[in-house]
């Protein structure tokens, strides 16, 4: 069990460091602009851009969930025994995690095995696919639900959203810099700016995916901590290997239990752009805990 | 000057005393909340068992002993000290496991929706008790540390806080039950 807590801290610290790095990139860029061009207006514009993006943090759970076709579980649906089981597991693991907030349950009608969770302050929601309810037994389902509860207690959707916003800020900088490129007196410094913006943007994208993968591993570790049963999660992951592709917006992909867009993508280069560690790696990692 | 220093020290001591007293009250409250959670679940289990026995009775003719034992344990989980009730609940959980294992030989019962729903709810209450017991013991641990060790010990004995008993975890109950559906 001690390795569980060391692994937990390791993942937490690494993903936090990357996130702070990204936010630093987004914040120092306007000052680089000021140094290279003396353009105060441009600097203010870029800083305003960053502020606007940060404000968009307050988007709602409903929008994200409806974008992936999730619907709220109604009282009528609760008669179904598997849905009942899902709701029971949510309550059980809430106690295990000592989470006091409300969790609204959602259902996604899709045959693949998947789940997702979003939390904002003390409001949270967890969605499960009908495929997961059909194909997973109680034990396996408990592993998946524990993984989602772990995302909630770790505030992972906030972490991922902050990272996503940092990418958006740097992307907007890049676009702006590339547009003003031609019509300035200091052409040399503008090209330098463009290169810096490009590097920052590329870095932030890689960092976003790195954070997403770290947070997935962290949630796997925490799921074992909550259930005290690593085989629950391992068996569920093994069944997921047979998943088919699920159509969801790319921005929502990192919020899922397993990547819904590319269930079996696995080459070294694409590895850098993965939202989740490969299933095989996740299973091996859990077995070592 | 000396008077001021003495007043200062007394003030610090009083503030510390209030702070430590509040800590003790809070920890005791936490343990109480965890116990309330367990209590609710034990009562819910007790409510579920008569329906379970009624549903199973018709199918499982040769397991009268098992059913009698379950009915007896039912009354034990709703009365007595927390320790006694949780202990009875552990035995009940094991007995239920034997019953569910026996049911595997009765395909009609295994397909009975009513039975499946009851089984799900019983497993649910069992897991909730297991997880809440962890929270209870954690709270008791922090509370007992305060009651036992100096300097918080002084405040605890002055205010009459006594050490509290843990809920023993039996070997078989350490991991949540795994029941395949």
Image (cartoon, rainbow, N blue to C red):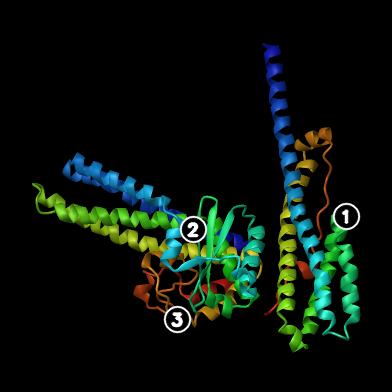
Mark on residue A156?
A: 2
Judging from the image, what secondary structure is the residue with disc 2 in?
Answer: helix
In which quadrant of the rendered image does the N terminus of chain A lie? bottom right
The number of numbered discs placed on residues in the rendered structure image is 3
In the displayed structure, A232 sits above or below B106; it is above
Read off the chain for label 1.
B
Task: Determine crowd level at label 3: few under 14, some 14-19, many 20+ residues with C-alpha closer than 10 A.
Answer: some
- The lab-note entry on whether marks 3 and 2 share a chain reads yes
User: Mark 1 = which residue?
Assistant: B81
Q: Nearer the viewer, mark 2 or mark 1?
A: 1
Left of B85 or right of it: where is A99?
left
- The lab-note entry on whether marks 2 and 1 share a chain reads no
Where is residue B129 shown, x and y percent of the image?
75, 62
Where is residue B5 shown, x and y percent of the image?
68, 16
User: Mark 3 = which residue?
Assistant: A244
Where is residue B181 shown, x and y percent of the image?
67, 80
Image quadrant where residue B12 sits:
top right
Q: Nearer the viewer, mark 3 or mark 2?
A: 3
In the displayed structure, A121 sits above or below B1; it is below
Cα distance between the residues tagged 2 and 1: 41 Å
């Amino acid at each position: 069990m001690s390795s569980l807590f060391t692994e937990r801290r390791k993942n937490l610290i690494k993903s936090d460091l990357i996130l702070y790095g990204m936010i630093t990139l987004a914040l120092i860029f306007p000052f680089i602009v000021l140094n290279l061009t003396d353009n105060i207006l441009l600097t203010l514009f870029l800083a305003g851009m960053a502020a606007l993006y940060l404000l968009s943090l307050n988007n709602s759970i409903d929008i994200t969930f409806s974008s992936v076709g999730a619907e709220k579980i109604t009282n009528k649906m609760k008669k179904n025994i598997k849905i009942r089981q899902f709701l029971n597991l949510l309550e059980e693991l809430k106690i295990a995690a000592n989470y006091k907030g409300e969790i609204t349950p959602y259902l996604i009608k899709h045959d693949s095995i998947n789940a997702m969770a979003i939390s904002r302050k003390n409001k949270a929601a967890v969605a499960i696919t009908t495929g997961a309810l059909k194909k997973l037994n109680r034990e396996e389902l408990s592993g998946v639900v524990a993984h989602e509860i772990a995302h909630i207690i770790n505030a992972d959707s906030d972490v991922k959203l902050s990272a996503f916003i940092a990418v958006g800020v740097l992307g907007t900088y890049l676009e702006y810099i590339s547009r003003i490129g031609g019509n300035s007196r200091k052409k040399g410094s503008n090209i330098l700016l463009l290169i810096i913006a490009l590097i920052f943007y590329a870095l932030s994208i890689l960092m976003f995916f790195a954070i997403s993968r770290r947070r997935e591993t962290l949630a796997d570790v925490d799921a074992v901590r909550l259930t005290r049963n690593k085989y629950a999660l391992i068996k569920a992951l093994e069944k997921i290997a047979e998943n088919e592709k699920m159509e969801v917006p790319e921005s929502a992909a990192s919020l899922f239990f397993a990547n819904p867009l590319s269930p079996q993508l696995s080459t070294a280069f694409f590895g850098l752009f993965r939202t989740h560690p490969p299933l095989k790696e996740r299973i091996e990692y859990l077995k070592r805990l | 000057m000396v008077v001021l220093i003495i007043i200062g020290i007394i003030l610090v001591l009083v503030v510390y005393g209030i702070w430590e007293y509040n800590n003790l009250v809070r920890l005791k409250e936490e343990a109480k909340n965890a116990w309330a959670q367990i209590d609710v679940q034990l009562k819910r289990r007790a409510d579920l068992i008569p329906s379970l026995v009624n549903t199973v009775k018709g199918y499982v003719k040769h397991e009268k002993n098992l059913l009698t034992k379950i009915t007896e344990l039912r009354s034990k989980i709703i009365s007595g000290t927390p320790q006694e009730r949780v202990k009875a609940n552990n035995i009940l959980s094991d007995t239920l496991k034997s019953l569910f294992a026996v049911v595997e030989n009765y395909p009609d019962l295994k397909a009975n929706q009513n039975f499946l729903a009851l089984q799900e709810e019983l497993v649910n209450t069992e897991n909730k008790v297991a997880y809440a017991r962890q929270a209870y013991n954690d709270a008791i641990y922090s509370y007992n540390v305060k009651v036992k060790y100096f300097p918080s010990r002084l405040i605890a004995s002055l205010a009459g806080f006594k050490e509290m008993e843990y809920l023993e975890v039996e070997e078989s109950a350490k991991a949540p039950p795994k029941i395949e559906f």
